[in-house]
Image (cartoon, rainbow, N blue to C red):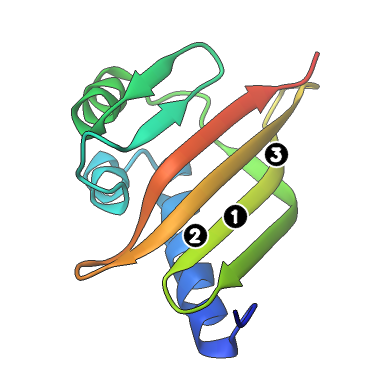
């Protein structure tokens, strides 16, 4: 297994950056596009557990668009071969003292890199 092949790492970095921009700008269509459209996709949020693409999509559509600005710190992307990657980052929302963590599992699909599992949590 080849770890962090430069061209794969660059592609995952671009997908991660696109996701982050869409998140803070509340570009729901982009966020939806970056999750794998499958009942196997899951997202554990700070206050919700979402199973399947449709549940994640519904959550995004109903989520308030305020207070999304944040700064990422200590982001670690790791690719495994050509088709699998993880992304982990710490974040801090503007105006909040609480630190958060985000983990994503990415898979290369025929449509491009997609999040297949995600987890968001806030530290006390």
Q: Residue furthest front?
A: 1
Q: Pointers 1 and 2 in contact (CB under 8 A)?
A: yes
**Which image quadrant: the N terminus?**
bottom right
Residue 43 position within the rendered picture, expressed as x and y whole percent measured from the top left? 42, 30
Nearer-the-camera pick, 89 or 109: 109
Residue 106 position within the rendered picture, expressed as x and y whole percent measured from the top left? 44, 56
Nearer-the-camera pick, 45 or 64: 45
| Residue 64 located left or right of residue 105 | left
Determine the CA span between mark 1 and mark 2: 8 Å
Residue indicated by mark 2? 16
Residue at (54% x, 32% y) in the render:
119
Q: Is residue 22 positioned above or below 119 on the image?
A: below
State the SS at label 2: helix
State the SS at label 3: strand
Residue at (58% x, 29% y) in the render:
120
Determine the CA span between mark 2 and mark 3: 14 Å
| Residue 93 located left or right of residue 25 | right
Nearer-the-camera pick, 109 or 1: 1
Q: Quadrant of residue 121?
A: top right
**Which image quadrant: the C terminus?**
top right
Residue at (41% x, 71% y) in the render:
83
Q: Residues within 10 Å of mark 3 (few under 14, many from 20)?
A: many
Determine the CA span between mark 3 and mark 1: 13 Å
Residue at (71% x, 56% y) in the render:
75
Q: Which mark is residue 87?
A: 1
Q: Along the polypeptide, which appears first: circle 2 or circle 3?
A: 2
State the SS at label 1: strand
Residue 40 position within the rendered picture, expressed as x and y whole percent measured from the top left? 29, 37
Q: Is residue 31 positioned above or below 84 on the image?
A: above
Q: Is residue 7 positioned above or below 29 on the image?
A: below
């Amino acid at each position: 297994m080849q770890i962090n092949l430069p061209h794969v790492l660059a592609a995952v970095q671009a997908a991660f950056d696109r996701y982050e921009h869409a998140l803070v700008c509340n570009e729901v269509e982009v966020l939806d596009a970056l999750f794998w459209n499958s009942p196997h996709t899951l997202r554990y949020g700070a206050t919700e557990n979402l199973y399947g693409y449709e549940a994640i999509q519904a959550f995004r559509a109903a989520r308030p668009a305020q207070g999304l600005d944040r700064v990422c710190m200590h982001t670690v992307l790791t690719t495994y071969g050509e088709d699998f990657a993880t992304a982990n980052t710490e974040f801090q929302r503007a105006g909040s003292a609480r630190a958060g963590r985000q983990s994503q599992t990415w898979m290369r699909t025929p449509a491009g890199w997609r999040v297949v599992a995600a987890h968001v949590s806030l530290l006390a």
